[in-house]
Amino acid sequence: MDKNLLIKLLDSVADGSTATLDAAKKLQHMAYEDITYAHIDHHRSLRKGFPEVIFGEGKTADQVAGIMEKMVPQEKIILVTRIDRNKADIILSQFPSAVYHGDARMIVLELETIPIKGRGPILVITAGTSDIPVAQEAYLTAKAMGNRVETIFDVGVSGIHRLLNHKDSIERAAVLIVAAGMEGALPSVVAGMIDKPVIAVPTSVGYGVNFGGLTALFAMLNSCSSNVAVVNIDNGFGAGYMASLINRV
Amino acid sequence: MDKNLLIKLLDSVADGSTATLDAAKKLQHMAYEDITYAHIDHHRSLRKGFPEVIFGEGKTADQVAGIMEKMVPQEKIILVTRIDRNKADIILSQFPSAVYHGDARMIVLELETIPIKGRGPILVITAGTSDIPVAQEAYLTAKAMGNRVETIFDVGVSGIHRLLNHKDSIERAAVLIVAAGMEGALPSVVAGMIDKPVIAVPTSVGYGVNFGGLTALFAMLNSCSSNVAVVNIDNGFGAGYMASLINRV
Amino acid sequence: MDKNLLIKLLDSVADGSTATLDAAKKLQHMAYEDITYAHIDHHRSLRKGFPEVIFGEGKTADQVAGIMEKMVPQEKIILVTRIDRNKADIILSQFPSAVYHGDARMIVLELETIPIKGRGPILVITAGTSDIPVAQEAYLTAKAMGNRVETIFDVGVSGIHRLLNHKDSIERAAVLIVAAGMEGALPSVVAGMIDKPVIAVPTSVGYGVNFGGLTALFAMLNSCSSNVAVVNIDNGFGAGYMASLINRV
Amino acid sequence: MDKNLLIKLLDSVADGSTATLDAAKKLQHMAYEDITYAHIDHHRSLRKGFPEVIFGEGKTADQVAGIMEKMVPQEKIILVTRIDRNKADIILSQFPSAVYHGDARMIVLELETIPIKGRGPILVITAGTSDIPVAQEAYLTAKAMGNRVETIFDVGVSGIHRLLNHKDSIERAAVLIVAAGMEGALPSVVAGMIDKPVIAVPTSVGYGVNFGGLTALFAMLNSCSSNVAVVNIDNGFGAGYMASLINRV
Amino acid sequence: MDKNLLIKLLDSVADGSTATLDAAKKLQHMAYEDITYAHIDHHRSLRKGFPEVIFGEGKTADQVAGIMEKMVPQEKIILVTRIDRNKADIILSQFPSAVYHGDARMIVLELETIPIKGRGPILVITAGTSDIPVAQEAYLTAKAMGNRVETIFDVGVSGIHRLLNHKDSIERAAVLIVAAGMEGALPSVVAGMIDKPVIAVPTSVGYGVNFGGLTALFAMLNSCSSNVAVVNIDNGFGAGYMASLINRV
Amino acid sequence: MDKNLLIKLLDSVADGSTATLDAAKKLQHMAYEDITYAHIDHHRSLRKGFPEVIFGEGKTADQVAGIMEKMVPQEKIILVTRIDRNKADIILSQFPSAVYHGDARMIVLELETIPIKGRGPILVITAGTSDIPVAQEAYLTAKAMGNRVETIFDVGVSGIHRLLNHKDSIERAAVLIVAAGMEGALPSVVAGMIDKPVIAVPTSVGYGVNFGGLTALFAMLNSCSSNVAVVNIDNGFGAGYMASLINRV
Amino acid sequence: MDKNLLIKLLDSVADGSTATLDAAKKLQHMAYEDITYAHIDHHRSLRKGFPEVIFGEGKTADQVAGIMEKMVPQEKIILVTRIDRNKADIILSQFPSAVYHGDARMIVLELETIPIKGRGPILVITAGTSDIPVAQEAYLTAKAMGNRVETIFDVGVSGIHRLLNHKDSIERAAVLIVAAGMEGALPSVVAGMIDKPVIAVPTSVGYGVNFGGLTALFAMLNSCSSNVAVVNIDNGFGAGYMASLINRV
Amino acid sequence: MDKNLLIKLLDSVADGSTATLDAAKKLQHMAYEDITYAHIDHHRSLRKGFPEVIFGEGKTADQVAGIMEKMVPQEKIILVTRIDRNKADIILSQFPSAVYHGDARMIVLELETIPIKGRGPILVITAGTSDIPVAQEAYLTAKAMGNRVETIFDVGVSGIHRLLNHKDSIERAAVLIVAAGMEGALPSVVAGMIDKPVIAVPTSVGYGVNFGGLTALFAMLNSCSSNVAVVNIDNGFGAGYMASLINRV
């Protein structure tokens, strides 16, 4: 539940505009709500500054919609990740103001405008064109969490001059997200240029011994640049989330 | 090279106390210095806010000392990681003011007092007693980089009440480092309690299918808490470094 | 063959209601029956207290039905696991009183009512919504084997308060089954709260370095709680079976 | 802390033989005790029916002794696992009544006689002679936890008649622990003979593609017998612990 | 090319019924024939006692038929393995006397009757029903190579009495092929009963940590019975081929 | 951009046929061109002697066509790799003079005739028929880069005489590319016959423990012949590219 | 127990030279003997044609000697494998007629002369000099089991002419054992030359991605020659044992 | 055998200075020499332009010296790789003119001066100081094979300016060898700057998920630069050998 909504409710009790019993009823579902197939963690917005994000994979469209329905009254924004177009169509028919982003496979349902809270811009960089879907997931997440977000795509290390030409944007960023598949070398090079934290996102782009992104992941964990931390393969969402929290420390 | 040392040098040229030719000689080694077996990156302090840290493994004591010798005139603090006691003894005989930390296998040579630059405290937590050496590496690094650092050791998830009793320290921290071996579950639980970034450090503690820390690493990358990013196994240094940069964003 | 059926047969010989030759004929297929593509282990009910369970994967619908046909005269209950809806439809057309559970991909054919034999309740817990199909397989198996079974779904460690609120049910259970994917941390936390055996079931829920459940499996085998033993990935059936035997020790 | 000790303390307060302040002081360390390098979980005996077991690997002899010192006043029995002879010698010089078992690498410090609590005998079986050390760890643990424990060693599947000759002991056991390295086939065969739960312990015995026990582990997780659950490689302690809890359900 | 065909050709030259030039033309393609996409090894029958077997996977139906066309004039029997029904239909329309075995995914084109050459019966055993397709591939290969072949299906180790009841057949066999998935324990048990060579074939039957047959493979390579050698996963053909050569030593 | 095109442009400025401003405009896109989803590296022809090759996997047909459109004015030849027929059809409708090679999954758009620049013939060898698609990718790439290219297909080591009969071609080649799946032994044998560099290409042909080409890859990296270097699994393009550069050293 | 010894005993009962009670006492230990740490399988000679072979690894010298002591009265030959020189010295002091082979790490105790039983010569080939210890283990085992054994060492595929020059020996052998490390290609080439069964033994010789012999193992399992079956890495004993049984089929 | 030595011998026969019988005796050992534990491939110099190189690992000092003894009369230079100092001391006592290079663990015995045959300089680059031993092995090999060789050490991608400052040397090289551990990114960046072939050598430098060099290896095989081929981990020798052959194409 959003903190402001909670305060507003308590204020309305204080000034008598909400009856105690009505408030109690509303509050009782606040810690979490058990709808058999899910324990919705309404408390998360208070505790973590952002509501629970729905992981779409392995849930039916009905389950996702059912969780969203319970969250709408309590939150400002709802994100669903890893949701394919078929499920999304069913869900959007129920929440027409939600937007589906096909490349990032995300639904964003913005119930109130999200103000900018981050200290500086978050910059999302990719090594190749094929890494863009993962980068988009990071981009949408970081935007939803109240950050200015910039992007530079397809500046992999086989043509290092392309990267060096973006030196200004890179140095201006407060936090960086670098997505790369194949040999996963880009985060090391970018991180070597700056004194800002870099969240590296390995992508499953490549073939043969890229092992669905594993090689890029291990390369990033072995980075000779020390200002690199890593999230799971293709986890653009996690990168955007982590970068957002860093940007508010 | 340290930024202040650079400004001081330029000032001394400006006020005539240093001859131009002497200054030029000093400056020429500033980008990097090639001593055959190493290209010392003196420029790093300017570019990245902290001097190059010497990775001791695979280098002879003489090589480490040789690199330190070149760095001393230009830096405020020098760190050597992954250095065993035998090599350390040789090095310390040459740099008597350096301190060797046996548990963390680090040498710290503080040439000037390091002021606090971080926004809030960095908290280092371990799941078990055996994870402490890795935690110490993180602790020493974060301290060397100008942070207040606190620690809580041996609060693994098999007795969750031990962890919950430290809730206040956990919520007060600006950035958290959580080191765990075995099943690597602690970062997920800690991260679920707060809205701050957590750097997870898998340790090689355990046996059988912990695979020298790999299981903990993968568990952390799969964390169901989104405010977790991960560094390499036993990489306490990297965790401390990353947390320090985050603490200054 | 069910023990009671065997005794009944022998009694009927004793009191003359069944002719010796008829009984002999019935008995001759009792150790096992060779139907070319399968050796049906009729002796299993006597030896193991529960009839052979048919593993549906890799068998044709006809093979499954053929095995069921031979078992019906000798058993009280027949289970088929890992059977998809297409095959199930064919089989159910032949055994109309059987029930197909789509989420658990199981057929249950109850020929007699199964009495409760377990000492206490078996509790099935999942970390997420997507783990429910595996939990259902455990639930149906444990019920078929004569246990009271309870469930708590979606109480993963990223919101530990959801779990702690179910403390009473958890402490009341005689045996626990905990299914989790991703980092597989939940069994450790649950097991740390109690002095009862916990059967941990890794699920293939997750992506990237969850490796189809392998990370959860290894995490569970590395559990810092000692009252945890593990079954194969997604093996809800095995967990339910093992828990049932434990519940009768 | 042992439950009886707690009740005794409270009784002594009730009858005036212990002053309230003295009792309070004793009680304050009961949840856990923070001795910097460890949070000793004194509450574990109450919560889990058995005190914390000290994992010796990665701890210094001093750390182990320090933890034991704090536990002695509160517990009936103390176990230390994975402790080599050198460390054990140091520790035993401080706790002369403790016993070191070299094959199992365990210290057992029995402060009071442990009564039998288990329902039936626990049977520990090994496939080979080289698996005995792991079996001993299980044996000692199960005995320390109040069970009758029997053993059969070196009855691997390459000479199946050796196993079948022990049919009586096998059928008499309430819970079975089966340790095997190499191809890890023994638990499947044993479990197929009975209707009791089998805890399978893979051992690292073998070479080449046994991968330090991994092959045995995976074979056991794939067991075609359903009454098998598995613990980590060489984890005799875990097997003994789990079997003990099962034996009290 | 078949040895007898070669001798017949040479005889016909000797007795003048074939002109030297015609014979030369026929002989020139005998070592191998280069048809651009394949070098058909006609020499193999002479060198290895059996013609080249066509591995169907990754070849088009046209390529397979093209190779068969070149082999027909020179061989007594042609085998195609790993060929799906669609390709087989195309091929059989061109070679109507060939037979397609759907379960084994093999085409057998018998151009002359194959006499029995093996010393004793080859026995093919499977652990489960789902292993039968692999066993069939071995069966058809061994039969095509001139052996008496017997089969016993579904006698896995979870009900060891099923296996022991076939002791006579097992002891009568000259060479044994044992196919098993899951934990792959059956070859060890069978081999422990006899003094004959056992070819173990791991199958991909199972799920989770059977890793598509890898666990069974490794278990078999770790067999505590020494009269076991192993072929690739699901390689029924290789097992049948190897057993046939052994049966003629 | 092609070097000759660049010189021609500068010449036309020198002789006044192109206005300075027009030339400047043309030149400004020469280092690279940012079309949002890609940074096209026009500088690559100058730097590396061959234009950027478009990796088709993970790009839409529109993205590929968009990149080609920007390259056409500046290059002599354009290659697209890993492009399936559906995407190719869309692209060829826009570039009718481009040719799609279905077996190699490549588009070649030759804008000018490519002269032979290589010192000697490049020879492409395969172990089996199923390796031909990978070999074709190498063949087309090497031809596009200005080499004479020869091929020998299906001469694997199970019939070594087939290989030895091609000794002359093998000894005549300046550089060799050897593609093999399964056990990947062919490059070792070929390399042992000559003193020329061999580029080994593992293919994903095989099943079971070939692990999609990994076994062939590792075998090749372990080659007991020292004149072997290796590229990624199925990377015919990389082999052709590398061989071409070697052929011009 | 050796079959002849058994018959002799029974004969001596028949002719009265042995008292019934004495014979009974001797016979009672014949199935197996339980000496606490081992179940010695005396029955193995009858069942399998060769006594149990003692695997030395993980057993103490005393345990090995204890087992030998029980076997001496019943067997003609005793083998101990994987036994290092230190243990061997202790054992030989007790069995002075035993011989220790340092390269093969085997003890052979020949109590009676072993007659030749194999049909033809067994040929042991190695790819390199470093593979010889494994080959020696195979050689000694096959000799102990009654075979003529020949050897050819260091004829790896990087100089194929060395192998081809031994064509006669290779074609003369009844069974072949081929040991190779690194890329493990030799068994495929050898097997391609003949129509006899080849037992391939991967060795751990090599470095990097040979993975302690795993690459050679997988290469051999993927052999494009069908007359190859494989044993565990460095398992010279198993290869010799298997070849011996094949040589008697 | 060296080609010139062969011609000289034949000339001396032609001019009568060597008797035919003496020449025959010398020639008979030329194809290869069988000294029981090794088949020395004297023919290699003729066939491959460089004599057999002795792989020291797994051979005794005596075996190495024995092989050298046979090679000395026939070769101009002898290399021994992977030889530790202890063995080297024994060997050098027998061949005093040989030189041992401790960092590269190589013996070089130059019997005649090696003329320069390579077209241009070979450049050996390392990412770190710890990679130097591997680079030295490549350096010594390439020099022994008749090349000018240059080196640049410690220019990893975390400080990209260090690398860019060596642009001239990099562009001047005919062939490049790039050794890197950890994330293995350097070959991609170097290869992206030039149009020359790059041999990438992964080193085992690093810890945790570098897996003894595996991550660097896989990263290099996934290189987004196409002019990269790879050799085994730490295989400096192979890189130097391959580069030498490339430099003579």
Image: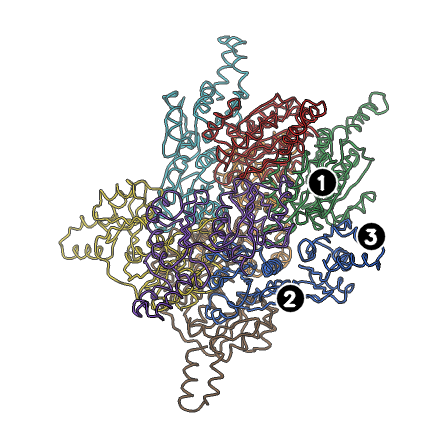
Chain colours: A cyan, B orange, C red, D green, E purple, F yellow, G blue, H brown
User: Where in the figure is residue D242, as x and y percent of width and height?
Assistant: 69, 35
Q: Same subunit under labels 3 and 1? A: no
Task: Tell me what residue is drawn at x 60 percent, y 71 percent.
Answer: H61
Dot 3: what SS? Answer: helix
Q: CA distance from mark 3 to mark 1?
A: 49 Å
- Circle 3: residue type: Lys
Picture layout, residue B222 above or below residue A112:
below
Which quadrant would residue D170 be assigned to in this image? Answer: top right
Of residues F94 and E223, the one drawn nearer to the viewer in this rendering = E223
Q: Chain of mark 3?
A: G
Give the residue displayed 71% in from the left and 50% down from the top: D129
**Residue type highlighted by circle 1:** Ile
- How far, Cα to Cα, is label 2 from label 3? 33 Å
Using the rendered image of the protein, determine whether residue A195 is visible from the camera's viewpoint.
no
Q: Which residue is mark 1?
A: D54
Q: Which residue is mark 3?
A: G25
**Mark 2 or mark 3, earlier in chain:** 3
Give whichever of A22, C44 is nearer the camera: C44
Residue G116: assigned label: 2
- Asked if residue A98 lies left or right of residue H99, the reply is left
C201 versus F159 height, above or below = above
